[in-house]
Image: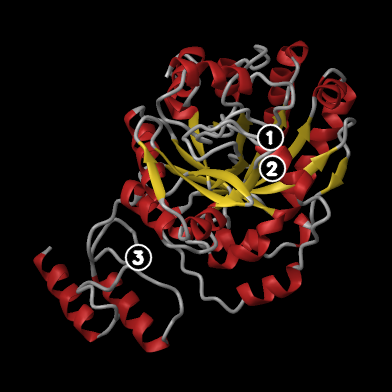
Amino acid sequence: MIFSLLLFISHILSQDWQSFHYQDQKRFEAFQINSLNIDERAKTFNPINNNRNNLSHEVIGYLPYWEYDEYPDLNYNLLTQINFFSAELSDYGDIINNHNWENLYFIEFAQSQGVKVKLCATLFGQESLTTLLSNYFNRQNAINNLLDLVVNAGADGIDIDFELVPASQRENLVLFMQELSFAFHNELDDPIITMATPAIDWSNAWDYESLAAITDGLFIMGYNYFYSGSSIAGPVAPLGGYFYDIEYTVNDYLDKTNNQTDKLILGLPYYGYDWPVINDFINSETTGYGTARTYAEARNLSQFHENFWHDISNSSWFTYLNNQWRQTWYDDSLSLSFKYQFAKEKDLQGIGIWALGYDDNYNELWDVLENHFASYQIGDVNFDQDINIQDVIVVVSHIINSESYTVNADLNNDGYIDVLDILILINIVLDN
């Protein structure tokens, strides 16, 4: 354990560490959204207006532009907010690329299903952030440009993803968020303002307490503890087993925010890494950079190899031979379940996902979200926290119109929604 800890500390302090959001953005920087065809498909759906109170916590997912084709198929009943990733800022506050944000039907579609939509603004790197944050006019230019995008699209708020912030800009980052909050609240009715924040603040660049007070939430990026350039293979989001892990991170935030639990969102990964390694031993030494694998990719690959569970870090891993040894670590439904439970025990505002679409519509990750955060009564098919004749009407309408969406109305769990479910529901209504 001591040996693993020392290796872990050495690898995470490596100079080539990069945030995963930045790595993903660079990988897909040439990707073009074919939004027209995707939006036309979404317009054939019959969305339902659910009461979002059926979720006990905030569930916030990032939708990257390269996963845009996945949005019609998301389970909106298990989401409260979606951050569209992203509007890319220049050092001077201009919008370099917003990935067709102003024309996306996704915003209206998600809102029609009771999910709030925020635009995520990104800027990465010490020099770029110093140029932006240290200059009043650059800050105001960025704020005005972002406000215009959000207002014109009818969105619900903004998410700021500034990463690798230098310590010299600690106070200016707080000032930027104060100025942004003032401008957004001056133009919008109750806008949602959040930030993506690091798992570990190595240089004391983040005033967590002030930022938590200014915003509606800090999305803690609780991943990339082991990363592409790690010297050993290991869990992307360990809960236990290492000095720097999710428990350390959350406790650090609680300490530095004066226990503002209602402002903390634990972001978790729908991805892992596949490293070339020297042998098939756990935490084997790497021989090169790891390849990022989405949850779906890692899951598919794992079906051909023996899978292992790492009790210490609550993570899944497997190893295989492909010309050389390789080792893959990722979070599956069991791993995420432990981390969701941890967030609940810490009384956090909620949890987050990087990134929506990385599960490729496998149901098990939705199922574990439902198990932990959905709180509805059997028979409350319209999620209004009451069981009455309105629920019967919803089920009847569903059957008559052969609607394509799924409602919580298969009351006898026979795989069909039919007259038997209506009879069961009527009995539940009469009993109430």
Q: Earlier in the sequence, mark 2 or mark 3?
A: 2
Left or right: 400 in relation to 147: left
Instruction: Specify the quadrant of the image occupied by residue 71.
Output: bottom right
Q: Dot 1 surroundings within 10 Å: few (below 14), some, or many (20 or more)? A: many
Left or right: 405 in relation to 116: left
Q: Earlier in the sequence, mark 2 or mark 1?
A: 2
Residue at image position (56%, 47%) is: 271
Report the Cα–Cα distance between label 2 and label 1. 6 Å
Report the Cα–Cα distance between label 3 and label 1. 33 Å
| Residue at mark 3 | 382
Report the Cα–Cα distance between label 2 and label 3. 30 Å
Instruction: Specify the quadrant of the image occupied by residue 148.
Output: top right
| Residue at mark 1 | 160
Question: Considering the numbered disc 2 on the image, is that residue within a helix, a strand or a loop?
Answer: strand
Instruction: Specify the quadrant of the image occupied by residue 174.
Output: top right
Q: Amino acid at mark 3?
A: Asn
Answer yes or no: do the residues labelled 2 and 1 have beta carbons within 8 Å?
yes
Q: Amino acid at mark 2?
A: Cys
Residue 170 image offset from top left, x and y in percent: 71, 14
